[in-house]
Image (spheres, rainbow, N blue to C red):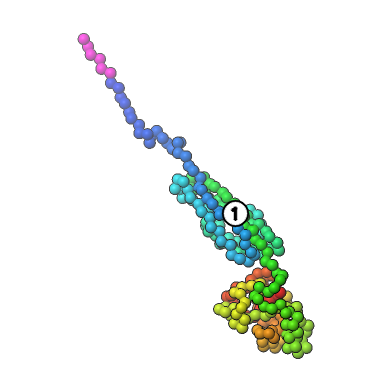
């Protein structure tokens, strides 16, 4: 009797060879821009966003502005940018959008609303100076030797980088100033810039810097300036 043999060739494929990546599920980044903020005009706004990728993929960040007055972010590719709140005449919403994209192309976006509020320009002086504007003007008028009529002003301060106002230390580090109304190209021989006999706002030094109404001058410059109440 003749024996017949059947040879069967088996080839084993590893599971990794069978899977060419079609079964891989990429997850988009998870992000948070934080809660909505309310700030006052002229202040520095700090944003603290977070982002993570479930697959551990590298990510890129991108900020864009959706609405509101234009702002300049310190970085459009950082999770923690800053910007200076613009001057406004009423409360305004600024909407920024963060988009985070992983290296596989999946992305997630989220909006952040920041409300910028106007600074009140009415009421008692925030520096705690007595509201005796008329008496102050009368005292100053007596010191001006028949000079031109007085401007309806409150105070003059000197600021010297470190102490801000060496003659009146109760004033704050920064505060709102009157926008300059004209070129500071004159002097009126006023020598006393502090104390109860302060002169009018016309005692302006030639070193005064032009300033947009509603902004604050930081305690980082020298000169003489005046404020409006």
Span colored in magenta: 1-6
Q: Position of residue 46 (x, y in %)?
A: 56, 61
Residue at screen point 73% across, 86% down? 139
Secondary structure mostly seen in magenta is: loop
Residue at screen point 61% across, 75% down? 172
Residue 40's quadrant in the figure? bottom right
Residue at screen point 65% across, 76% down? 128
Residue 180's quadrant in the figure? bottom right
Q: Position of residue 143 (x, y in %)?
A: 73, 88
Figure check: 10 above or below 5: below
- Seen in the image, is 188 located left or right of residue 25? right
**Label 1 element class:** strand
Q: Position of residue 44 (x, y in %)?
A: 59, 65
Residue at screen point 58% across, 62% down? 45
Q: Position of residue 194 (x, y in %)?
A: 65, 84
Figure check: 68 above or below 156: above
Is residue 24 visible in the rendered structure shown here?
yes
Foreground: 188 or 122? 122
**The N terminus - image quarter:** top left
Find disc 1 in the rendering and name its residue.
Answer: 112
Foreground: 177 or 137? 137
Residue 64's quadrant in the figure? bottom right
Is residue 144 visible in the rendered structure shown here?
no
Query: Dot 1, how many residues are within 10 Å of its Cα: few (below 14), some (14-19), or many (20+)?
Result: many
Foreground: 40 or 183? 40
């Amino acid at each position: 009797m003749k024996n017949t043999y059947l040879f069967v060739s088996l080839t084993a494929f590893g599971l990794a060879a069978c899977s060419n990546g079609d079964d891989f599920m990429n997850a988009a980044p998870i992000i948070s821009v934080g809660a909505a903020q309310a700030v006052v005009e002229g202040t520095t706004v700090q944003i603290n966003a977070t982002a993570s990728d479930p697959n551990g993929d590298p990510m890129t960040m991108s900020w864009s502005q959706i609405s509101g007055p234009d702002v300049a972010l310190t970085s459009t590719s950082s999770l923690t940018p800053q910007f200076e709140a613009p001057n406004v005449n009423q409360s305004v919403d600024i909407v920024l959008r963060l988009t985070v994209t992983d290296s596989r192309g999946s992305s997630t976006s989220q909006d952040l609303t920041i409300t910028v509020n106007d600074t009140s320009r009415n009421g008692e002086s925030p520096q705690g100076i007595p509201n005796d504007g008329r008496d102050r003007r009368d005292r100053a008028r007596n010191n001006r030797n028949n000079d031109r009529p007085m401007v309806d002003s409150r105070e003059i301060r000197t600021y010297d980088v470190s102490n801000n106002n060496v003659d009146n230390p109760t004033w704050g580090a920064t505060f709102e100033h009157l926008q300059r109304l004209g070129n500071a190209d004159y002097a009126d021989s006023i020598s006393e810039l502090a104390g109860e006999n302060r002169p009018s706002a016309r005692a302006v030094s030639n070193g005064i810097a032009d300033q947009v109404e509603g902004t604050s001058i930081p305690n980082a410059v020298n000169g003489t300036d005046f404020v409006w109440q």
